[in-house]
Image (cartoon, helix red, strand yellow):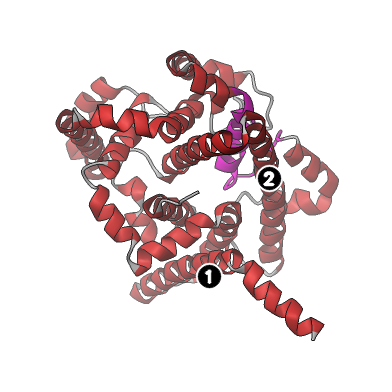
């Protein structure tokens, strides 16, 4: 299957933003996606994941049949779950190592580092059962829940798209009370409410599966859709600006809030949903050429390699965010500390790219090692 370079670049960008956003004292976290829109990299990650599911499913079903597609995504669901479990263990052990070395950090909850040593079997079982989802891995836990439904939900979506989306919207509408029914370590269900976020995921699946049918229809109204999308994003930018101004902008902020109500990331409120879809339209249509150009630059190709690293890149980005946070906390508070924290940000991004590049070329360099050992 031909890869879409801009799509891989955006996946890599989402992972970089997730990593930087989890470093509270970092410098570059002030210029990540969340600083310019009411949504953040989590929405981008879930939407792109859904798009890839839809795109891959259609290709596999066309060539090998529906059962092959179902088996492929059952296997993928297991891989994502396994990555969650392995990532949770590595996260806790790495945090414990840092504490043993007297290196403080705040990116991950300190109790995980205790539980993994004091009660390793209990820690492992609670993660395996998904009764507990360590922070920094919450969005991966959400992805497990979403992708495990794919073998049943995607065939339904492909056959009855309008009915499937109506069901998805209905579930999203009742997401908060439904999530309360999910047994979990913390009260109130999963942090990332799967009943809310499934709508964004399946919108991505539909776009990936039906893009050749949908886009010609939408392009006929591209002027209107572009204007509406710009309006939505400008509305979100006004909200962010009011938050940053603070007290002097309270009257304007109150007026805006009377329009949008509440912004709830965890259940995915309507404004965040509309904003990510508006941004998707702008990137896919009026800004398609600039993004294709960016994907062909050196930086774009490096980000694409991070994106193609998949689950490996995600786990590495989580561990690097903990390490980067720990290094940030040791930096002084003066200007030299600012420069040091900036250097740390650049270092963790470079380290993430190196890890992804090594992973993508693992067969090549492992083959060379085997050949040398064999000789």
Give the structural element (helix, strand or loop) at label 1: helix
Residue nearest the viewer, comparing 129 with 110? 129
Q: Position of residue 96 (x, y in %)?
A: 71, 60
Residue 222: quarter of image: top left
Inspect the magenta stretch and tell me whether residue 132 lies in it: yes
Is 197 located above or below residue 357 in the figure?
above
N-term mark: 2 or 1: 2
Q: Position of residue 286 (x, y in %)?
A: 21, 43
Residue range highlighted in magenta:
130-152
* Label pair 2/1, CB-CB below 8 angstroms: no
Q: Is residue 185 visible?
A: yes
Q: Give the labeled residue for mark 1.
A: 354
Q: CA distance from mark 2 to mark 1?
A: 22 Å
Q: Which residue is mark 2?
A: 79
Secondary structure beneath disc 2?
helix
In this view, which residue lies farthest toward the bottom?
375
As rendered, which of 274 and 130 lies closer to the eye?
274
Report the residue at 36% width, 66% height from top: 299
Mark 1 Cα-neighbour bin, 10 Å: few <14, some 14–19, many ≥20: some
297 left or right of 202?
left
Instruction: Say which quarter of the image contains residue 98.
Output: bottom right
- The residue depicted at 29 percent of the width and 53 percent of the height is 291
């Amino acid at each position: 299957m031909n890869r879409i370079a801009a799509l891989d670049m955006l996946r890599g960008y989402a992972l970089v933003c997730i990593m930087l956003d989890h470093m509270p004292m970092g410098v570059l976290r002030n210029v990540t996606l969340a600083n310019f829109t009411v949504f953040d990299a989590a929405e981008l990650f879930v939407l792109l994941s859904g798009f890839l599911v839809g795109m891959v499913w259609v290709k596999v079903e066309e060539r090998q049949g529906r059962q092959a597609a179902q088996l492929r995504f059952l296997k993928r669901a297991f891989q994502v779950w396994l990555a969650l479990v392995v990532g949770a263990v590595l996260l806790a052990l790495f945090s414990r190592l840092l504490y043993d070395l007297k290196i403080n950090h705040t990116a991950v909850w300190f109790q995980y580092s205790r539980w993994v040593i004091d009660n390793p079997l209990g820690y492992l079982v609670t993660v395996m059962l998904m009764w507990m989802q360590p922070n920094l891995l919450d969005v991966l836990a959400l992805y497990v829940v979403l992708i495990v439904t794919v073998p049943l939900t995607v065939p339904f979506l492909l056959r009855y798209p309008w009915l499937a989306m109506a069901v998805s919207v209905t579930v999203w509408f009742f997401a908060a009370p439904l999530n309360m029914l999910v047994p979990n370590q913390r009260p109130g269900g999963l942090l990332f409410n799967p009943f809310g976020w499934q709508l964004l995921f399946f919108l991505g699946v539909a776009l990936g599966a039906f893009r050749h049918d949908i886009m010609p229809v939408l392009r006929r109204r591209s002027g209107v859709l572009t204007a509406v999308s710009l309006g939505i994003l400008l509305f979100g930018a006004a909200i962010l600006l009011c938050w940053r101004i603070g007290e002097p902008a309270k009257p304007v902020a109150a007026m805006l809030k009377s329009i949008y109500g509440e912004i709830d990331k965890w259940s995915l409120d309507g404004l965040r949903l509309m904003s990510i879809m508006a941004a998707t339209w702008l990137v896919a249509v009026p800004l398609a050429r600039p993004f294709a150009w960016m994907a062909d630059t050196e930086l774009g190709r490096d980000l694409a390699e991070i994106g193609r690293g998949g689950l490996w890149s995600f786990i590495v980005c989580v561990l690097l965010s903990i390490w980067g946070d720990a290094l940030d906390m040791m930096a002084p508070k003066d200007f030299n500390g600012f420069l040091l924290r900036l250097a740390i940000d650049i270092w963790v991004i470079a380290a993430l790219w190196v890890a992804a590049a090594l992973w993508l070329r693992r067969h090549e360099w492992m083959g060379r090692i085997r050949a040398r050992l064999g000789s």
